Amino acid sequence: MNLRSKPDGERLSAQELCFLALMGALIFASKFVLAGIPNVNLNTLIIILCAIFFGWKTLYAVGVYVMLEGMIFGFTLWWFSYLYTWPAVTAFVMLFRKNDSPLVWAVVAGLCGLCFGPLMYILYLTVTRWETAVALWVAGIPYDLIHCVSNFILTLLLYRPLYKVFSHFLPRRGQSYRESALSSQARS
């Protein structure tokens, strides 16, 4: 099997593959844990952090997350929307990848939350009448606002601490996992 990441053009190492699979599972688990609070999740924040450290390879984590959603909750119409919605969120995040400001990332996460609902209902336009899709979107606006505000607050509060955790465990560009572990031990 070829494990080349086409967008970055670099080989995907076994460590990266394992870490990205774990990140996909973490996105799913964090959403599951917060499921009692409508539209409050860490999905976008985890995708932001993965994009900073892995670039387009983040799509592997997104793929794991989307597949877990389908396997657990069913492959229904909303799931098919996830096939393009979460990659679109990843692409939007990639535009700001070089940024290091928690405030900018909070705004990006908030915008992702606000746009998530309208993106989801694009597919509904193809399988229902446009009036139905618009009615579903309008009914979901309060939830989109909750998604926007919660993404903004969670990213503003958790970006720096989680960035430090990622930095501690992940190698810098051009460094192997072994070199990263040795430099982490030397810093300790």
Image: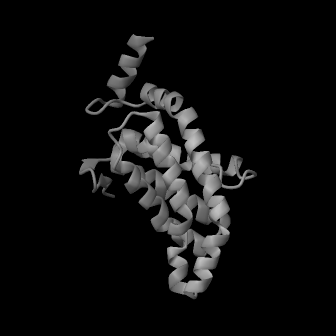
Q: Residue at x 33, y 50 (%)?
A: 95
Q: Residue 58, position in %: x, y?
A: 41, 49
Residue 169 falls in which quadrant of the image?
top left
Q: Residue at x 36, y 30 (%)?
A: 171
Q: Nearer the viewer, residue 98 or 185?
A: 98
In this figure, what is the number of numbered marks? Answer: 0
Q: Residue at x 57, y 65 (%)?
A: 117
Which quarter shows the N terminus? bottom left
**In the displayed structure, would residue 140 be above or below residue 90?**
below
Colour pattern: one colour
Q: Nearer the viewer, residue 181 or 99?
A: 99
Q: Nearer the viewer, residue 156 or 46?
A: 156
Using residue 97 as the reference point, say whether residue 30 is left or right of it: right
**In the displayed structure, would residue 185 be above or below residue 5?**
above
**Farthest-out residue, right:** 36
Q: Residue 65, position in %: x, y?
A: 54, 55
Work out whether residue 25 can be spotted.
no
**Farthest-out residue, bottom:** 129
Work out whether residue 85 can be spotted.
yes
Q: Residue 27, position in %: x, y?
A: 57, 48
Q: Residue at x 48, y 67 (%)?
A: 83
Which quarter shows the C terminus? top left
Residue 88 falls in which quadrant of the image?
bottom left
Q: Residue 187, position in %: x, y?
A: 40, 12
Using residue 131 as the reference point, say whether residue 165 is left or right of it: left
